[in-house]
Amino acid sequence: MKLRTMITGAILTLSLLAASATTAFAAVPRGRLEKVSDSAITGWAYNKDLPNSPIDCTVAVFNKATGEEVFRQRVTAGEYREKLESQGKGNGCHGFTIPMDWSSLPDGEYRVEGYVGDSDFANTMNHTKGDPQAQAQAQKTAGNQNLIPLGVFKTTGYCPCRACSEGWGRHTCTGAIAAASHTVAVDPKVIPFGSKLMINGVVYTAEDRGGGVRGNHIDIFFNTHGETLQHGTQNAEVYLIPSQA
């Protein structure tokens, strides 16, 4: 009986060690960006422990001037790439394509990053929209003006989804089309429509209002609902940029 117990214990110990070794040497998923164009972002993600299975990854875009994340999307990498198959990456079905609408973003330079599991992609890529020098000059001009402090405001976020915009999408009450890093909703009794505001170094235009925006409260427009949740509720110093005479 004692011998049987010892054998059982030894088998259990070996099983645990084998499981630990398997976990310790599990492959780390890898990914890489291939191309960033005016209409799409492409790349691949692959786990050699699952050579013929597509895996999920995430792509994010950041404004290089402000550091603000302006876009994030999760995607399943399951498109066929002949090059990946020839490189020995399973059946080659590990590519992805994310349609990208840069028109909703202001001119400037952007950094694109990717993530798979807990790992970063092997590379990042840059994309230039419009004339970044003109955008940089505009930001510099705004920074050199005599900003008027309006005090600390509560800031929240909203996006084009029905839950946030109540069916209005990107259409604002002033007739403008809302854009990320540009549009904010305000209480017009506190901040007149058309006012240029600087919040955390970003210049916004007051061109919308919301049912819950009252007093010292500003609602910042984002492209996705995930970004609004990430922003949450914050407090920030708000400055008015005087209009040019």
Image (spheres, rainbow, N blue to C red):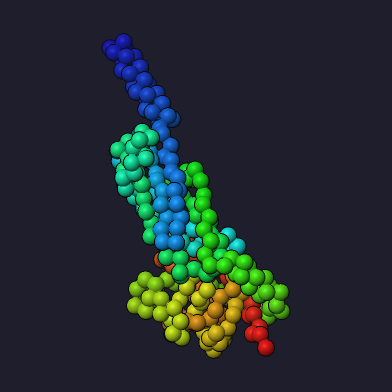
Query: How far across and how far down the image is residue 133, in percent?
Result: 62, 66
Rendered image quadrant of residue 50: top left
Q: In the displayed image of the protein, which residue is found farthest to the top?
A: 3
The answer, for residue 31, to whether it is visible in the render is yes
- Residue, x 51% and y 49% (percent of image)? 124
How many badges with numbers are in the image? 0
In this image, 192 relative to 89: left or right? right
On screen, residue 161 above or below 42? below
Q: Quadrant of the C terminus?
A: bottom right
On screen, residue 195 above or below 102? below
Rendered image quadrant of residue 84: top left
- Residue, x 44% and y 48% (percent of image)? 34
Query: How far across and how far down the image is residue 148, in percent?
Result: 68, 80
Is 136 in front, or is 194?
A: 136
- Residue, x 30% and y 38% (percent of image)? 91
Query: How far across and how far down the image is residue 184, in percent?
Result: 51, 77
Query: How far across and how far down the image is residue 99, in percent?
Result: 38, 60
In this image, 165 relative to 199: left or right? left
The answer, for residue 199, to whether it is visible in the render is no
On screen, residue 12 above or below 165? above
Is 243 in front, or is 42?
A: 42
Is 130 in front, or is 74?
A: 130
Rendered image quadrant of residue 229: bottom left
Q: Quadrant of the N terminus?
A: top left
